[in-house]
Image: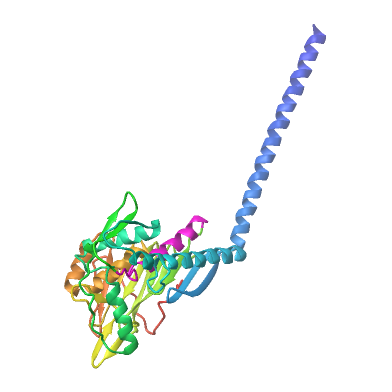
Amino acid sequence: MNSSRAIKDLNHLLFTRVNLLAYFSQRIGLIALAASHAVAQQTEEVAPLQRQYFSQPHLGTIVQIAFYSNNKEFSQKLAGDCFRQVKKLDKIFSDYRPDSEVSQLCCKPAKVAHKISNDLFDVIAKAQEISITTNGAFDITLGHTTQNWRQSARQKKLLLNENTETSYKDLILYPNSRSILFRRPLKIDLGGIAKGYIADRLMMILSKVGIKQAAVIIGGEMIFTKAPPEKDGWTVGIERPSREMLGTISISNTALSTSGDSYQFFEEGNVRHAHLIDPSSGKPMSNRLNVTTLARSAMLADAWATALRISTQENALKLANETKGIEATFIPFEKRARFTTAFPKLKKLHQSASKQSPGN
């Protein structure tokens, strides 16, 4: 009995020691894991994110991309992916290219439904939606008129336009088949919405790989995500028609677009003919006014800036205030600016600054 009990006591002691060893081994493993995690956190803190900036000429303007990453090689590859996407979408949307999808579409017979790419369908569908909301102030069927303006600008003389009787109502969409039908021959100009759509697509590329702090600027179309490190937002300048800065705003997780006549116009006599066409008359806008809009996407900001710029200022301000998700400022030449109720407060400048670079 004593021998048996001694064996049992020894087995119990060995079992206890094994359990204790297992316990301490587990604790040491947990401590080591915690230590390695702390080292990793410390390493991240030692290597802060760096601002990466890339730009290339595309779409008749400069495409700018800024984001934060501590991997330069990865950043360069990512920027390359973005610029390749710009080239791909330009071959779909550009009415300057005879081989683009939209140009080829306009050569096809009217009164017949034609299937189009998802990108082109999505942009035209959104354009039609905004045309309806703004009672035709935004209209992508003015392609013949805008081409006439370009020729007029080259000759510095407003030429007679014989293709003014077009309307967004002549364009029919079939969502189920992703097809489009023209009731009459039309020339589509997506200049007031396509750049915004492209900016949105570039931001999607950045977001999908985990970039959280980024800005994309294509001419006057801009989209921003989370604010840069240790900043409250991205600083953007708001410009007067005279190209002087009215002030700056700090924004994040939003898009911004400006429509005006500061850069695209020609003068004949004492009349300034902007590239913006009034669909109701088929004539270029001649009043000097900048409209800057804020929206959840660059495509919306782009199209709404054009629509509000075309509308009379009183109607535009009322419409912008009544439209959910749209904020705007209206800046007439040498007159007081007007704002929608929730437009961010401007910070006044003591000296001029460029709004075309993604500030931080």
The N terminus, quarter of image: top right
What residue sits 19% from the left and 74% below the top? 313
In the rendering, at what x and y percent does residue 64 appear?
47, 72
In the rendering, at what x and y percent does residue 213 appear?
48, 62
Q: Quadrant of residue 356?
A: bottom left
As rendered, which of 163 and 351 lies closer to the eye? Answer: 163
In the rendering, at what x and y percent does residue 336 appear?
23, 80
Please, is residue 326 above or below residue 21 in the view? below
Farthest-out residue, bottom: 269
What residue sits 29% from the left and 74% below the top? 144
Residue 289 shows in the view = yes
Q: Quadrant of residue 324?
A: bottom left
Q: How many marks?
A: 0
As rendered, which of 166 and 84 lies closer to the eye? Answer: 166
Residue 196 shows in the view = no
- Residue 195 in the magenta stretch? The answer is yes
What residue sits 37% from the left and 84% below the top? 350
Q: Quadrant of residue 283?
A: bottom left
Q: Is residue 297 left or right of residue 172?
A: right
Farthest-out residue, left: 314
Range covered by the magenta-colored residues: 187-210
Q: Is residue 275 left or right of residue 312?
A: right
Please, is residue 77 above or below residue 331 in the view? above
State whether the magenta stretch is mostly helix, strand or loop: helix
Farthest-out residue, top: 1
Q: Is residue 339 left or right of residue 215?
A: left
